[in-house]
Amino acid sequence: MALECRIHMATIKHEWISFGGCSAIVTCTSLILGLDAAASSGQAIASSLLIFAVADNLSDSLSMHTYQEAERLESRKAFISTIANFVTRLFVTSTFIAISLTLPRRWLSLVAGTWGSILLTLLTYLLANARGGHVGKEIAKHLGTAVIVIGLSRWLGTWLAAAFQ
């Protein structure tokens, strides 16, 4: 019984971090690479990440909570998963803010892209392993999707820089 409870709690914890973690990783990496391509200042990049950490995080957490209530998830579980989502996103975003504030500008995109890939790979590994899924396929699928989103953000940044010069 105790082992079943621990396994169930581990699965729930993966669920708690999966949405917020993935969202924060891909969005932060996309913001940094897109804003860097747009020739934004380091202050603008850090400010954008901080605004994302607060505004988008709160709105997504509220949306997630509202959805869970609509699905009639028990109130305590909905509350715990909402808080876990918020804290996960805040923590992940804070690592990207630290990167943007401490690194020289020339290294920012490379390090943020590498850090985002590492985090997404680790998160995907944990989730695929917990589900008993094919880890390699899941990592390839998630990284492939992230590359498309990040590439689009980079392209938009480059286009915006050229359009507004």
Image (cartoon, rainbow, N blue to C red):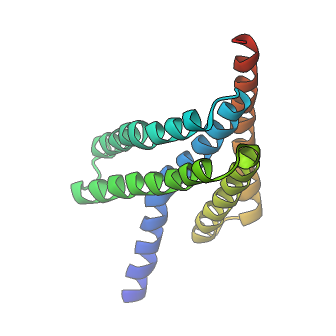
Left/right of residue 164 with respect to residue 16 in the rendered view: right
Left/right of residue 135 with respect to residue 20 in the rendered view: right
* Quarter placement of the C terminus: top right
Residue at 69%, 12% (x, y): give it.
Answer: 164
Query: Could you say which quadrant of the image residue 74 lies in?
Result: bottom left
Q: Residue furthest bottom?
A: 2
Residue 88 picture location, percent across and down? 45, 57
Query: Could you say which quadrant of the image residue 76 lies in?
Result: bottom left
For residue 63, above or below residue 124: above
Left/right of residue 58 with respect to residue 110 in the rendered view: left
* Foreground of the two, 96 or 135: 96
* Foreground of the two, 61 or 11: 61
Residue 118 picture location, percent across and down? 69, 60
Left/right of residue 25 with respect to residue 37 in the rendered view: left
Q: Is residue 1 visible?
A: no
Residue at 30%, 53% (x, y): give it.
Answer: 78
